[in-house]
Amino acid sequence: MIYKQNDATNNRPEGSRPLEADYISLSFAERIAQLKSEKAWAEGDRNAITLLHHPRLRLVLMAMREGAWMNTHTADGPITIQTLEGAIEVEVCGKHFPLLLQEAIAIEGRVPHSVKALSEAVFLLTLGPGEQDTF
């Protein structure tokens, strides 16, 4: 049974897709190809798609062009960042962590961090719930 789904958007006009269900099977290769075929990627320095949006877990696939940078920000709950293509650098607490292919970092909730693409890169962002469970 699907509990939550996403409606079609300008970036993704093909229709709705499940965001929360009893199970969701994912192909990173298909979603990466989708990200890189969309207007947001063609015209900008990044593109992202939420793969799972559950009250206790969120998965976001993000593609960034070389040199793209996400300003310092925080997440309410713990996160992991895992590279699937290319290389990124994550800055946490004034320390720089280069993440090469298939490397990851875990960051506690409410800890400021930023992300910079060292090359064209794709990473999986996994977000856990914060104290307020604000998903």
Image: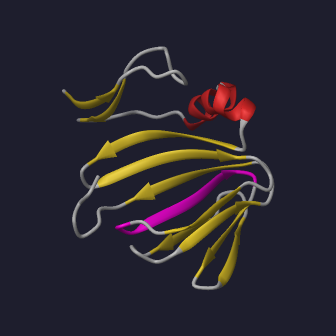
Magenta-drawn stretch contains 77 = yes
> Above or below — where is 41 with respect to 110?
above
Q: Is residue 27 left or right of residue 110?
A: right
131 or 82, nearer to the observer: 131
The residue at 64%/64% (across/down) is 115
The residue at 51%/22% (across/down) is 12
x, y percent for residue 120? 78, 48
Numbered range of the magenta stretch: 76-86
x, y percent for residue 123? 61, 52
Q: Is residue 11 left or right of residue 119?
A: left
Q: Residue furthest top?
A: 14
Q: Is residue 39 left or right of residue 8?
A: right
x, y percent for residue 104? 58, 65
> Above or below — where is 42 with respect to 65?
above
Quadrant for residue 61, please give it: top right
Q: Residue furthest bottom?
A: 94
Quadrant for residue 51, please give it: top left
x, y percent for residue 96? 69, 79
